[in-house]
Image (cartoon, coloured by chain):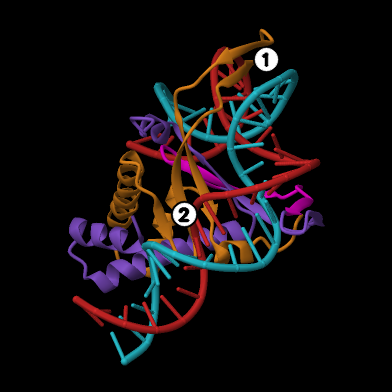
Chain colours: A orange, B purple, C cyan, D red
Amino acid sequence: MIKNDIVLAIEKKTDFSGAKSLEIVEAILKELKAALAQNSKVEIRGFGSFKVVAKKTGYGRDIRRQKQIHITQGKRIKFRCGQELKSIAPKAD
Amino acid sequence: MIKNDIVLAIEKKTDFSGAKSLEIVEAILKELKAALAQNSKVEIRGFGSFKVVAKKTGYGRDIRRQKQIHITQGKRIKFRCGQELKSIAPKAD
DNA sequence: CAGAACGATGTCATTCTTGATCATGGAAGC
DNA sequence: GCTTCCATGATCAAGAATGACATCGTTCTG
């Protein structure tokens, strides 16, 4: 599924045009990004929650040179799925 | 940020009522859950991608009993943030 | 179509994972 | 709008799994 699929889904659910659906999706994404940018945790009950955590993984690895790279800066956005999302994932392949 | 914040954001961006905005948000969430339920990978360029991976961590740990718990069933929904999301998270707090 | 982001690989360190419980807060009901 | 209900979060511990950088190919986006 890509962004366009979500847009199409909104089109089907509502009676909006594809353009309008698209701007709605982008608006939501913008809101999410803005929220995460200010270190806010995004929590949607029944779906999941995004949380920005400081990345302490101060060790990268350059496979081409087999050398370690020191990294300490950066953050990571963790997404934890809620109970309803745990319910899905039917067959473990 | 909670679900209501997203709903309010749609209200501001569009001219829909809060109820309509809410159903749009829920429709999107439903689509995402449905996509993940069928093992589909959800990829949103510039935001991030959800991927359903089989959980191989067949060992949990009950600290209260100091005993290992065998788990093999289950899946996990991994979210990897895209480049635009990496750009955010300004100060590492 | 063109451009740019995304995925995977490899090694090693770091983080995550499960599980149950208490408290907090999101969500829904009145 | 306020209150209630129930999901969510943190924790401890040990083991397993993932992440990160760099590059190329592929796919998504406009």
Q: Residue at x 33, y 39 (%)?
A: A37
**Residue on which disc 1 sits:** A63
For residue B93, side relative to residue B51 (left or right): left
Residue A54 percent coordinates (x, y): 46, 34
Q: Nearer the viewer, residue B4 or A24?
A: B4
Q: Residues within 10 Å of mark 2 (few under 14, many from 20)?
A: some
Which marked residue is nearer to the observer: mark 1 or mark 2? 2
> In 3D space, how far apart are the residues under numbered discs 1 and 2 (Cα atoms)?
33 Å
| Bounds of the magenta segment | B42-62
Q: Is residue C30 above or below residue B93?
A: below
Residue C23: quarter of image: bottom left
Find numbered disc 1 in the image and state the secondary structure of the residue it sits on: loop
Find numbered disc 2 in the image and state the secondary structure of the residue it sits on: strand
Quadrant that contains the C terminus of chain A: bottom right
What number is the disc on residue A49? 2
Q: Nearer the viewer, residue B1 or B93?
A: B93
Q: Is residue B58 above or below residue D23?
A: below
Q: Amino acid at mark 2?
A: Ser
Q: Is residue A3 magenta?
A: no
Residue A1 percent coordinates (x, y): 53, 51
Q: Is residue B55 magenta?
A: yes
Res. A38 visible in picture:
yes
Q: Is residue B55 above or below residue A82?
A: above
Residue A90: quarter of image: bottom right
Q: Amino acid at mark 1?
A: Ile
